[in-house]
Image: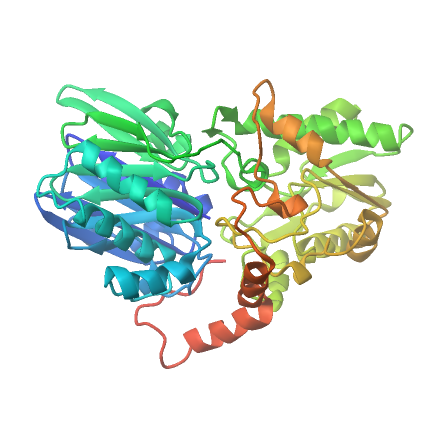
């Protein structure tokens, strides 16, 4: 999962893009990058690290121009080398810099096709480099020295025909403006907003609406699935539907885990969706154990807090904060190895003994992937004297890999892999394990809205793009298991490691 932003302004964009990226930092802590454009010249800064580590004052002073794009990353394909930080750029037929959130599922075929047919060289294993070259090729074959919005949209149509997967893209084209487009299923989020200034209209496009909020942009709407938006240098917005077939299939895991609660994605208020998840969980508790003995509901920080609060309210039991979180430790399920994850949990959370001792505790988390974190948290709670420990997940069991841009582990490493809820509860050491029902999750996310379909693959193995084969899943399984990642880490730490590679942020 990554975060992207694009901006056409009437003044320097560097600080505004920086601020927007800090609001999207939760979507990627591995690397950050920015490209700005003045005249026909690009100014680029990217590296591994958090936003405030990558962009120092000396870098910001060199990022000139009134248009630009930015990116925060954690890697789902390729390595975590600083060489693969985004944006990527090409210089023909125009200067084009591009960043993207998501994952292309036909990367291997595209790389060979580009080498053999398009005669373009791909230097990294990043699908974003493939994307920028495909866009450049589709623009080049139009043969226009000065492409119109119609020409640019025709190129995007060509891109859609060639690529598969989930993607939201921003690109800056020197001398012309900023382009953004979204996959035909709307798997990865994209929204744009406007700001009126004395000098004229400014336009921002970003992964989440919170990036618009901080810069004073008024959210206009989400970019539709398959739609492209082109913002010219005057700040005029041009849009066109560029995919032959499109439908909106919101990613439920965005709502459960990744998105900030103060964001609105595809018309869904994330905070309210998570409140409804808590209501549904409470209803399940009452249905299964109407005479429950829960003394207190305690969230596992941070994403589950909203659901846990509403769950406690519905059950009529106290809600308490029981853990103090070290905010300088990153998300644990994307860490490279089991040993590092185990170390991290103790560094990340510390229980408040008085909230647990002698009580029947209902712990609430947004989801459970490997179960490593959950098991250690349960043991910590028992160690400080909890009488009983129950555990509720705001999401259904995660049993299948995500192929659209969320770097989950090998399915064999999922705690729910080929196990029942009772067996999962035994493994993590709880007295009662309860999961959200998938239909209830869909209803909680939708609220009063209606969606024809959802991206639910991590829960039910149904991939909405229809092109995911057993062979593909086997291949990514080999890429994602801990043993492979450990080997990659050892290589990266060796003598061939890129210079200036920061320590990974976990």
Is residue 332 shown above or below 245?
below
Q: Nearer the viewer, residue 193 or 473?
A: 473
Above or below, 259 relative to 372: above
- Percent of width and height locating residue 378: 75, 51
Q: Nearer the viewer, residue 407 or 403?
A: 403
User: Going by the image, does 119 lie left or right of 338?
Assistant: left
State the residue at coordinates (65%, 26%): 443
Residue 377, horizontal then vertical, whole percent: 71, 52
Of 134 and 362, nearer the camera is: 134
User: At 85% from the left edge and 43% from the top edge, which residue is drawn?
Assistant: 358
The total of numbered circles placed on residues is 0
Judged left or right of residue 82, residue 314 is right
Write the residue at 78% across / 34% down: 296
Image location (x, y in percent) of residue 337: 58, 66
Is any part of residue 419 visible from this angle? yes
In the rendered view, tell whether residue 172 sits above or below residue 310. Answer: below
Whether residue 122 is visible to the viewer of this picture, yes or no, is no
Q: Is residue 375 left or right of residue 24?
A: right
Which picture quadrant has residue 233?
top left
- According to the image, what is the colour scheme of the structure? rainbow
Q: Answer above or below: position of 148 versus 142.
A: above
Q: Is residue 206 left or right of residue 417?
A: left
At x 47%, y 28%, the residue is 266
In front of the other: 73 or 216: 73
Query: Which residue reaches farthest bottom?
Result: 495
């Amino acid at each position: 999962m990554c975060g992207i932003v694009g901006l056409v302004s009437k003044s320097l964009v560097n600080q505004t893009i920086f601020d927007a990226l800090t609001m999207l930092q939760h979507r990627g802590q591995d690397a950050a990058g920015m490209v700005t454009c003045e005249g026909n010249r690009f100014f680029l800064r990217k590296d591994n690290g958090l936003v405030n580590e990558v962009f120092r004052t000396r870098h910001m002073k060199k990022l000139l121009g009134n248009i630009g794009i930015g990116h925060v990353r954690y890697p789902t394909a390729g390595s975590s080398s600083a060489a693969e930080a985004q944006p990527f750029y090409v210089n023909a037929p125009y200067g084009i810099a591009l960043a993207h959130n998501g994952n292309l599922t036909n990367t291997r075929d595209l790389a060979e096709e580009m080498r053999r047919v398009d005669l373009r060289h791909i230097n990294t294993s990043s699908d974003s480099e493939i994307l920028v070259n495909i866009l450049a090729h589709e623009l080049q074959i139009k043969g226009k020295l000065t492409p119109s919005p119609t020409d640019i949209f025709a190129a995007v149509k060509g891109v859609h025909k060639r690529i598969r997967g989930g993607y939201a893209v921003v690109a800056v084209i020197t001398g012309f403006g900023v382009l953004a487009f979204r996959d035909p299923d709307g798997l990865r989020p994209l929204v744009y907003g406007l700001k009126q200034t004395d000098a004229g209209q400014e336009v921002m496009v970003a992964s989440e609406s919170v990036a618009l909020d901080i810069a004073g942009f008024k959210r206009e709407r989400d970019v539709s699935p398959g739609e492209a938006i082109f913002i010219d240098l005057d700040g005029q917005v041009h849009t066109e539907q560029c995919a032959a077939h499109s439908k909106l299939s919101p990613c439920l895991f965005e709502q459960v885990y990744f998105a900030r609660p103060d964001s609105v994605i595809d018309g869904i208020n994330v905070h309210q969706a998570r409140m409804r998840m808590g209501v549904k969980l409470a209803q399940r508790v009452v249905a299964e154990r109407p005479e429950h003995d829960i003394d207190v509901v305690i969230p596992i920080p941070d994403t589950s807090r909203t659901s846990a609060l509403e769950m406690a309210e519905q059950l009529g039991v106290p809600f308490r904060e029981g853990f103090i979180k070290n905010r300088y430790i990153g998300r644990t399920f994307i860490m490279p190895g089991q040993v590092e994850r185990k170390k991290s949990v103790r560094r990340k959370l510390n229980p408040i003994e008085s909230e647990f001792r002698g009580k029947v505790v209902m712990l609430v988390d947004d989801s459970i992937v490997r179960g490593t974190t959950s098991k250690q948290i349960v043991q910590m709670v028992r160690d400080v004297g909890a009488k009983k420990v129950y555990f509720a997940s705001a999401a259904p069991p995660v049993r299948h890999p995500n192929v659209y841009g969320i770097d989950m582990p090998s399915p064999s490493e999922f705690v729910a892999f080929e196990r029942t809820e009772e067996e999962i509860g035994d493994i993590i050491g709880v007295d009662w394990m309860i999961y959200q029902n998938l239909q209830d999750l869909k209803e909680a996310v939708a609220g009063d809205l209606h969606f024809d379909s959802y991206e639910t693959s991590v829960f039910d193995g149904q991939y909405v793009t229809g092109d995911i084969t057993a062979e593909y899943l086997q291949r990514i399984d080999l890429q994602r298991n801990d043993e492979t990642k450990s080997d990659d880490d050892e290589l990266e730490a060796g003598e061939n490691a890129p210079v200036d590679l920061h320590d990974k942020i976990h």
